[in-house]
Image (tube, rainbow, N blue to C red):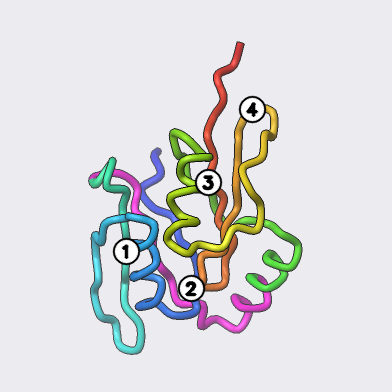
């Protein structure tokens, strides 16, 4: 068994697509219209055949209260691996991304958390070498 995809619930799929591709640098994989919404997935430019991230509409009645509770408690929806959190923090800040937690040493990882502008907090993390 292997992970082929994960989802993040977004308040506006087209806005999310722009943010995740133009701002974060992911690559569009699928954008298939399905009535009011679409099946939109993005992949890492570093691994275009890797796991896909679906930009799911948060239309279900439970979705928005759930997302709001996570944001209010400062809990990231998901995490992305990066080689250098400080450099990525600087790159994204220069692109207008709002961080709610700057790069922080958490023992085994250095992590930072940003607002994806679509109703979620997202963590980026750099694994530290273990002795």
Tell me the CA gap for discs 1 and 3.
17 Å
Quarter of the image for the N terminus: give it: top left
Q: Position of residue 3 (x, y in %)?
A: 40, 44
Tell me the CA gap for discs 4 and 3.
13 Å
Disc 4 element:
loop
Which of the pair 3/82 is nearer the observer?
Answer: 82
The reply to whether the magenta stretch includes residue 68 is no
Disc 1 element:
helix
Left or right: 86 with respect to 14?
right
**Residue that badge 1 annotates:** 22
The reply to whether the magenta stretch includes residue 53 is yes
Query: Which of disc 4 and disc 1 is earlier in sequence?
Result: 1
**Residue that badge 2 annotates:** 10
Q: For the residues carrying marks 1 and 4, which lies nearer the camera in this image?
A: 1
Label 4 neighbour load within 10 Å: few <14, some 14-19, many 20+:
few
The residue depicted at 54 percent of the width and 29 percent of the height is 127
**Residue that badge 3 annotates:** 124
Q: For the residues carrying marks 1 and 3, which lies nearer the camera in this image?
A: 1
Q: Which residues are magenta?
A: 49-66
Query: Which of disc 1 and disc 2 is earlier in sequence?
Result: 2
Q: Position of residue 68 (x, y in %)?
A: 67, 73
Asked if the residue at tag 3 contacts the one at tag 1, i.e. Cβ–Cβ closer than 8 Å, the answer is no
Disc 2 element:
strand
Query: Which of disc 3 and disc 4 is earlier in sequence?
Result: 4
Quarter of the image for the C terminus: give it: top right
**Residue that badge 4 annotates:** 108
């Amino acid at each position: 068994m292997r992970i082929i995809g994960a989802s993040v619930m977004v308040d506006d799929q087209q806005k999310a697509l722009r943010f995740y591709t133009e701002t974060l640098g992911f690559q569009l994989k699928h954008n298939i219209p399905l009535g009011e919404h679409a099946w939109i997935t993005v992949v890492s430019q570093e691994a275009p055949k890797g796991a896909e991230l679906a930009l799911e509409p948060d239309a279900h009645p439970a979705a928005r209260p759930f997302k709001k509770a996570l944001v209010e408690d400062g809990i990231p929806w998901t995490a992305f691996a990066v080689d250098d959190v400080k450099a990525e923090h600087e790159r994204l800040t220069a692109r207008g991304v709002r961080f709610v937690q700057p790069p922080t040493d958490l023992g085994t990882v250095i992590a930072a958390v940003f607002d994806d502008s679509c109703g979620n907090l997202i963590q980026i993390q750099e694994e530290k070498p273990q002795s």
